[in-house]
Image (spheres, rainbow, N blue to C red):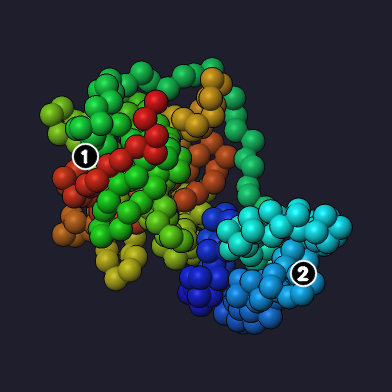
Amino acid sequence: MSKLIVPKRYAEYLPYSLAIKLKELPEKAQYEFIAEFRSCKRSTLVMYLAHFFPIPFSLGYAGKWFQQFLFWISGGGFGIWWLVMLFTMPSDMVEFNRRVAVEVFKDIAEKYKINITPPQPQKTQVTRVPKSLDIPEFDPTQTTIDHLKPGFLLDLEGKTWQVISEYQFDVENESSQRQFRCIADLEEQILSFTNEGLFKKVEWKVKTNIYQVDPEIEKKIQQFGTPPNILYFKGHRFYKEITKKGHKFDMAEGDIITAEHTIVWSYLNEERDLLLHLEKNNHAKLSAYYGKAIDENYITEILPHQIS
């Protein structure tokens, strides 16, 4: 995976689902995106200048030629439309540049054979429902990670993260684990926790390329039914600790929630301060996560997206 070369101010014009794929583009393709987008994007300042021309063409400059024609024949809405546009032009320009960014990205992704279609795995329908968890009633004055759900904000490691999805992993004969995908700019992390009596076991990890862990990992699991007892990653030696089996639920699916049978192999390094997880679902899809256990108190400023 290449490092991100595209400036953040350009990447932010793309939807998040495409922006995170910028890192998958080779460096040459990223430079092409920068050059092409720079040549096609338009300026708010120029739009304002076009608006003050004797015959304004600011709407046309933003790609809205039909509206521009209506603007001309109505005399700028008798001047009212002209005044309103003084406040709407910045957002019009952002909208135009977002469309340009998406088109440029799609062209380059097609050229370099990068798949930008989100995967839609066909989940096996299992007659199973997630375990009912004893979640404390929401109190806006005393929010904890128990109250997290999509839309919530939290501060961790000097950044503000937003929860974008929630999962529940019901482990066989054990407590359930709640998992939250969190984003900050173009970064994505997984926050997960399990209630163990009076304490919580909290993990903060990032999804990583499975082949960086071991290029032959899939073949080894297929051959032996389990990954090796020792793995090497990022200069650390990781030892297999436990294997957990259960069902994972996407809690955002509404009334009908499908279950995926999931196996998680957990590893710890020699100092036992870093973790590595390998996860396989019933479609044989294999994922890897790298991170650490953290103290719940490190997570601060938990705020709801909206209070219902």
**Element marked by disc 1:** strand
**Element marked by disc 2:** loop
Quickly name the residue at label 1.
201
Residue at the spot x=75%, y=54% of the render? 78
Q: Earlier in the sequence, mark 2 or mark 1?
A: 2
Q: Is residue 285 visible?
A: yes
> Where is residue 91 drawn, in percent x and y?
59, 59
Mark nearest the camera among 2 and 1 is 2
Residue at the spot x=76%, y=70% of the render? 56
> Where is residue 112 drawn, in percent x and y?
70, 72
Residue at the spot x=79%, y=72% of the render? 55
Nearer to me, 219 or 192 = 192
Label ID, residue 57: 2
Residues marked 2 and 1 touching at CB (< 8 Å): no
How far separated are the C-alphas under marks 2 and 1? Answer: 60 Å
> Where is residue 17 drawn, in percent x and y?
57, 54
Q: Amino acid at mark 1?
A: Lys
Location of residue 7 with respect to 237 vertically, above or below: below
Q: Amino acid at mark 2?
A: Phe
Nearer to me, 275 or 229 = 275
